[in-house]
Amino acid sequence: MEQVEILDIPKHQYRQYTRREIDEARGNLSLMNDRVFMVAFEKNKNNHIITGLVNALRIIHDVTPIPQIQSTTVQEPSLADILGRGMVADLTGLGLQINIALEAQRKIQEGYAVRATLSSSNIMRHQFETGNDYAEAPDVIGINILGFRLPELKNNLMFCSRIIRAEYDTKETFLADKYSDYYVEIPKMNNWTKETLPEQYHEIWDYCSVMQAKIKDHGKVIQMQAITNPAVLELAGEAQKAVAPNDFVNATLNRKSEMEQLSDYIRMQQRKAAEKTAEEMILAALRSNFATTAIETMRQSAGITEARLDELKKQAQMA
């Protein structure tokens, strides 16, 4: 019978937070926090804001605005999603002959462009079944709001990029009016100011400014960026509403504690695995009569104690 290792995952330790800690945590949250985003848009809340965000991107390239998104679903990320991938939100929106896939990602993820393409491809199946008239297949828009620079777009200095299909030789677009993906690289905003951008970028600039700003800085950002778009101002208000309950902030702090403990646990497991590998290498070296100086170098590099090395020497002699 296969032996199953029982993992000793630490128990989550919660405590009572002070009013000052709660207020400080509330002010430091933003819409690029997974729970804030989820509460702001869950259960079909604020579909008009999502519609406005999509159209703020489409206006850049003079693309026809989409009709009102009728329903949205926000997936609650797991701790593994947030810790391992830096995922903030995965939102699916459905409208009249239109589907959208919106993802926000804080941390850089290798191969993210492939993942985003798959997300857009997956949503093509919503509201469309095999055998239906393909002419009735919904248009699909993928939106990716990133807290990092995408390697595939390193040559594009603009913070917003629209990706469409094209015929290779002629460069003629292929179903560009039906399928497109947008990438918003927030770090590239540092290369610009609102005043230096073409006017068609101003609306998406305002959305991104509010999304990335801490709650406590919303007023200052709105004033500095001269934001007057009602939907963007409402977005800031919805973020404020989301973080208003003390219970929400408490749960956010608790989840942060869980993430820190999980992160520590993963690092501990990785360290144990590395030590085990190092010990196996030292054992092999001892059995092969490697020079003492070489084994000592291996021991120091792996952080193995002299006492543990003595134990490994005994194991090597017994083999």
Image (tube, rainbow, N blue to C red):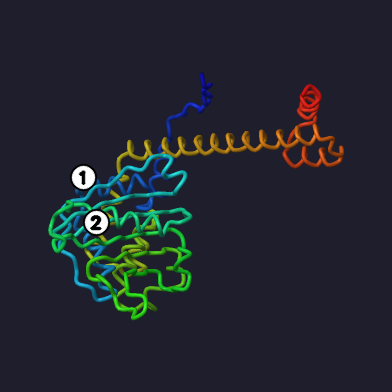
Task: Name which residue lies at 24% across and 66% down.
Answer: 229
Work out whether mark 2 precedes mark 1 in sequence or the reverse, and give the earlier one: 1
User: What residue does disc 1 label?
Assistant: 43
Q: Quadrant of residue 198?
A: bottom left
- For label 1, the crowd category at 10 Å Cα-Cα, with few meaning under 14, some 14 to 19 and many 20 or more, is few
Q: Label 1, secondary structure: give it.
A: helix
- For label 2, the crowd category at 10 Å Cα-Cα, with few meaning under 14, some 14 to 19 and many 20 or more, is many
- Percent position (x, y) of residue 134? 16, 61
Q: Label 2, secondary structure: give it.
A: loop
Most foreground residue, 81 or 132: 132
Q: Quadrant of residue 171?
A: bottom left
Residue farthest toward the bottom in the current orientation of the protein: 170
Q: Amino acid at mark 1?
A: Lys
Whether residue 216 is visible here, answered yes or no, is no
- Percent position (x, y) of residue 151? 48, 64
Query: Relative to 204, is 25 on the left or the right?
Result: right
Q: Which mark is residue 196?
A: none
Most foreground residue, 176 or 229: 176
> Of the residues tagged 2 and 1, which is closer to the observer?
2
Most foreground residue, 39 or 223: 39
Q: From the image, which quarter does the C terminus lie in? A: top right
User: What residue does disc 2 label?
Assistant: 124
Q: Amino acid at mark 2?
A: Met
Marks 2 and 1 sit apart, C-alpha to C-alpha, by 21 Å
